[in-house]
């Protein structure tokens, strides 16, 4: 059940980023990066709580697996989309530079 919650948070982050990027007309916000930041905070919070509880090793491992495992599973998918976004953004910059160079060359020929 926790896995479903993390998937919903991931999809909400991606949806918000998609809406912002659509309004701006270019790639600006990385939704997967937002999720990875939130997941890192959640994992750090859970690790600190588990260490502070003084649980025996077996119960400590169970707490980590139950609380942190689903966040890391969805985090693996988010990492893929994070790097995919970076590649897409780099491609967008490259295309923009090529278009700008072509426009400058056309302006010099026309002048």
Image (cartoon, rainbow, N blue to C red):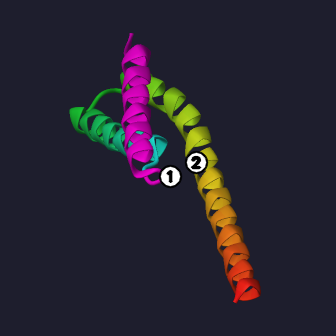
Secondary structure mainly formed by the magenta segment: helix
Residue drawn at (48%, 41%), measured in percent from left and top? 32
**Residue farthest along the top direction in this orientation:** 1
Residue drawn at (29%, 38%), measured in percent from left and top? 51
Q: Secondary structure at mark 1?
A: loop
- The image position of residue 11, as x and y in percent, is 43, 27
- The image position of residue 21, as x and y in percent, is 44, 46
Instruction: Tell which of 61 and 73 is nearer to you.
Output: 73
Q: Quadrant of the C terminus?
A: bottom right
| 3 magenta-colored | yes
In the rendered structure, the answer to whether residue 105 lies left or right of residue 3 reads right
Q: Is residue 101 visible?
A: yes
Q: Image quarter for residue 61?
A: top left
Disc 2 to disc 1, C-alpha distance: 8 Å
Q: Please, is residue 28 above or below residue 111 in the view?
A: above
Residue drawn at (46%, 50%), measured in percent from left and top? 25
First reached walking from the N terminus: tag 2 or tag 1: 1
Instruction: Tell which of 77 and 102 is nearer to you.
Output: 102
How many C-alpha atoms fall within 10 Å of the one at disc 1: few (<14), some, or many (≥20)?
Answer: some
Q: Which mark is residue 85?
A: 2
Range of the magenta residues? 1-28
| 66 magenta-colored | no
Residue assigned mark 1: 27
Q: Please, is residue 39 above or below residue 106 in the view?
A: above
Residue drawn at (59%, 56%), measured in percent from left and top? 89
Mark 1 and mark 2 in contact (Cβ < 8 Å)? yes
How many C-alpha atoms fall within 10 Å of the one at disc 2: few (<14), some, or many (≥20)?
Answer: some
Q: Is residue 61 visible?
A: no
Instruction: Tell which of 34 and 66 is nearer to you.
Output: 34
């Amino acid at each position: 059940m926790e896995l479903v919650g993390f998937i919903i948070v991931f999809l909400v982050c991606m949806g918000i980023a998609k809406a912002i990027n659509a309004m701006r007309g270019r790639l600006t916000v990385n939704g997967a990066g937002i999720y990875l930041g939130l997941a890192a905070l959640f994992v750090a919070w859970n690790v600190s709580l588990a260490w502070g509880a003084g649980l025996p090793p077996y119960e400590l491992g169970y707490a980590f697996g139950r609380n942190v495992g689903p966040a890391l599973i969805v985090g693996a998918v988010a990492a893929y989309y994070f790097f995919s976004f970076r590649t897409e953004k780099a491609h967008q910059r490259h295309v923009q530079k090529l278009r700008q160079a072509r426009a400058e060359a056309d302006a010099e020929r026309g002048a």
